[in-house]
Image (cartoon, grey):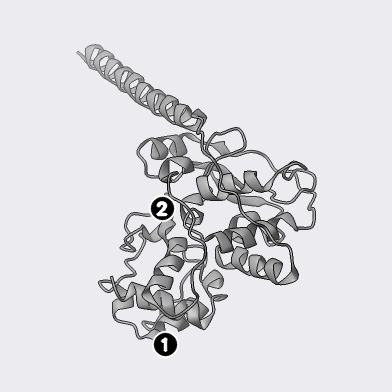
Amino acid sequence: MLIRILKGTGIALLSLGVLIAGVYGYMYYQVQSRMNEKYVVQAPVLNIRYDSAQLAYGERLAIVKGCRDCHGDDMGGKVFVDDPGLGLLIGKNLTKGKGGLPKDYSTEDWVLALKHGIRRDGKTLLFMPSYEFTHLSEEDMSAIIAYAQSLKPVDRELPDHNLKPLSYVLASLDKLPLIVAEKIDHSTELIKQVKSEVSVDFGKYLSNSCTGCHRPNMKGGDPIAPGFPVVPDVTTSGNVGKWTEDQFVTVLRTGKTPEGKEIDPKNMPWPMTAAYTDTELKALYAYLKSI
């Protein structure tokens, strides 16, 4: 009897193992297929200026849009996730130093990356939040590109992304923003510019930088990846609905909430929002209070 039980258990475990391997194999193949899909889009032509004011504006945008969080303070790239489950995720070297972008990386290539989340070969970028940058105005995108093209070369060679099984499983279930180009409406056109003023419209424009975590409706939800906290609701039905404008500004400048909580900058990049102007923070507050 014991032998029969052991045999039965062994067969059940083997069957379960085969089933799990089959499901994972399907997920892996599906994600690989999506990663290898080629997109054909026409990048809009931008008029790039390289005067000192434009370069300074572009540098500031690179800070407040979070570019340095993944690519490093010198934009020379860094490892931004090293997790046994997810794998190794790399912020690329965006300079033209050793290990960086090719010498002939053009303005069109930059627009494809920022506006469409697409590489030069037509395949999707991975983990790059182009779904936020796609809503930039021509003025702002041009400034960021001008700044990026003026970066001093940084010699830093980094490995490619090394995705582990959990990344494939989560990406297959659309629980990880891996395949960037899928999340973008490639038919939308860039707006020329946005007026910087304390208004709901300007606040909504700024909130595009928040959608990667807080979702387009700003209601938050499930963690963006394993190990991260639940993403809070930042509309009127969340804490923002209870905070005054001054309290909201203080939170995004200091990382300290009126309730006495200190926000971990690894989970909410308040050092990035600390660089926002008063006008930008007040506009963002006005928008969040309107929804």
Q: Is residue 46 left or right of residue 171?
A: right
Please tell me how crowded label 2 is: few (under 14), some (14-19), or many (20+) other residues with Cα within 10 Å.
some
Whether residue 61 is situated above or below residue 86 in the rendered picture: below
**SS of the residue under disc 2:** loop
Residue at which label 1 appears: 246
Q: Which mark is residue 280?
A: none
Q: Amino acid at mark 2?
A: Ile
Decide if residue 179 is in sight here. Answer: no
| Secondary element at image label 1 | helix
Q: Where the N terminus falls, by quadrant?
A: top left
Residue toward you, 96 or 140: 140
Q: Is residue 238 above or below residue 190?
A: below
Please name the residue shown 70% across and 49% down the image. 93
Residue at image point 35% right, 19% down: 18
Q: Which mark is residue 224?
A: 2
Name which residue lies at 36% across and 73% down: 287
